[in-house]
Structure formats: structure tokens, C-alpha cells
Image (cartoon, grey):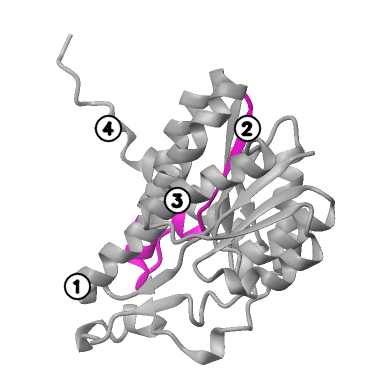
Amino acid sequence: MTTWFITGCSTGFGRALAEAVLAQGDNAVITARNPDALAELAARHPSTSLALPLDVTDPAQVAAAVDAAEERFGGIDVLVNNAGHGYRAAVEEGEDAAVRELFETNFFGLVDVTKRVLPGMRARRSGTIVNLSSIAGRTSALGSGYYSASKYAVEGLSGSLRQELAPLGIRVIVVEPGGFRTDFAGRSLGQSEVPIGDYAATAGTRRKSAAEDGSQPGDPAKLARAIIAAVASPEPPRQLLLGPDALARTRAELASQLEELEKWATVSASTDFDA
């Protein structure tokens, strides 16, 4: 039986994935800052679930949660680093404390959880790490520079981690969702307190609004099934785009990058010492 360890399970992607994993009979360590939010789900699966408090920015809680998971189930087969949130601001508007907290959660928390889980996976020479990124980790959007930066960091780390772990039998999958109907645009999305007028026509057009929350096209339950299928695959994707919007944005971005690369190729190739 596969044992999953999933961060950020109170709502959204984490909750949908926890529901799906437990429904198929796997073990799941489900975590949230407030474990009371997980009580009902855990009660429905008393023998296969373990609900734990976990703030990924608290190293002591990270260590305690991983230890408890390994003690209960003997090891972690699949780690899903899902905990995170958004932040909107023009780069100049970004507030230092909010930006640092964003990176502590979206990036450094992911790193800490991963490093705590890896010794067990290395000892068994098996395991899968799933890092939740975003289409914002592939294509930057105005007003989301800091959020994109946190996800680009996840993407860069995951690429190196994948190469380091492949010889040890451990796989790394990055998931890049587009717009899904979660509370991401609600309580999970922060923004700068004081907008600057000069950015009203650019970053200002993406100020948080209640209208966009709950109107996203993506189905979190289908995302959960897609992640489960990728983990079960003998050849999982390195980067799993989810959502037609994510696919379209990435195709457009790659085409634009390739066009520019070729336009400047002569200059790019001209910088070696002359023979």
C-alpha cells in the first residue's frame, strides 16, 4: 500500500488530493496548520489516515510530522509539497515582510519538508516527490512577479533535485496548474496594501477581486486524479501542465522564446575567443 504525505490539506488542491488518495485505499498523512479542518476526513478513514498539524515554516513541526508519519506507516512513498499561497503586487509595491513570508512558505518550507523526507526515501532507494508549482512558474504575469519568482525557484530546485535523485530510484514531478476552482483567489491570495498609481494600467489590473474567486474553470478533483496517474506512471512527466489555459500559455511562451532565440542566435554564438 502506498503512503502519501501531503502538505496543505485543509482546502484546495491538497484537500482534493487527500480525498482521492484515501478513497482509493492508500495511506495518507494529511497536514494543515489547523488540523481541526481535517478531523472529518480523518474520521472517515481511521485506519489509513493520519491528520497532523503542520506549518511548513516551522522546522520543529516539520520534523515532528515526518517522524510521526514514519512511525505510523513505516515510511513515506510519495511526498506532495502543496502548501503555499499567492501574492499580487507590482514589484515596486511589494512589502518586504509579505514577500519574505511568501518565500518562506512557497519555497523554503518546501525545501525543509523535502530534506526531512529524503533520508527515508534514500534508505529505501524509492519514492516520488511532487512539487506543486504553477503556470506562473513557467510564464510570468504582470502583478505576480513575487509569486512567479517563488514558483520559478521551485522549478529550478526541482530540476536539479531530479538529476540528483534519479540514480537513487527517487523521482521528482513538478505540477503546473492553470486556473482551478479553489480558494486561491480568496483567502489564499494576498496583495500589497498600498497600490501605486503609475501601475494602475499594468499590475493594477490584477488587483484581487471577489469576482474571480470561484469562477476558475479547472476542477480540483480532476487535478487530483491527474496527479495520481502521473505518480503511478512508470515514466512520469518532469513537468505536468494541468488545464487548457496552462497548456495554451506555455505553447505561446515557448513559441515566443524560440522566435527570439533565433533572432539573436548570431549574437549569442559570437562571444567565444576567436580561433
Kindly identify the residue that appears in the image at 61 percent across and 40 percent down. 71
* Residue 212 higher or lower than 184, as above or below: below
Q: What's the residue type where badge 4 is placed?
A: Ser
Q: Position of residue 36 (x, y in %)?
A: 60, 73
Residue lying at 19% horizontally and 25% vertically, measured from the top left: 271
Q: Secondary structure at mark 4?
A: helix
Q: Tell me the amino acid under the disc marked 1.
A: Glu
The residue where tag 3 is placed is 62
Tell me where the magenta segment starts and ends, as one range. Answer: 126-149
Horizontal and vertical percent for residue 124?
A: 62, 23
Amino acid marked by disc 2: Gly
Q: Nearer the viewer, mark 2 or mark 4?
A: 2
**Is label 3 in contact with label 1 (beta carbons under 8 Å)?**
no
Between discs 3 and 1, the one toward the N terminus = 3
Question: Could you tell which of marks 3 and 2 lies nearer the N-terminus?
Answer: 3
> Rounded to the nearest whole Å, what is the CA distance between mark 1 and mark 2?
41 Å
The residue tagged with tag 2: helix, strand or loop?
A: strand
SS category of the residue bearing label 3: helix
Between the residue at mark 4 and the residue at mark 1, the CA separation in whole angstroms equals: 31 Å
Q: Which residue is labeled 2 in the image? A: 127
| Residue sitting farthest toward the top | 275
Q: Which residue is mark 1?
A: 92
Q: Are marks 1 and 2 in contact (CB under 8 Å)?
A: no
Q: Residues within 10 Å of mark 3 (few under 14, many from 20)?
A: many
Q: CA distance from mark 3 to mark 2?
A: 19 Å
User: Is residue 210 covered in magenta?
Assistant: no
Q: Are marks 3 and 2 in contact (CB under 8 Å)?
A: no
Give the crowd class for mark 4: few <14, some 14-19, many >=20 residues within 10 Å.
Answer: few
Quadrant position of residue 49: bottom right
Q: Quadrant of residue 213?
A: bottom right
Q: What residue is pinned by disc 4?
A: 268
* First of labels 4, 3 by sequence position: 3
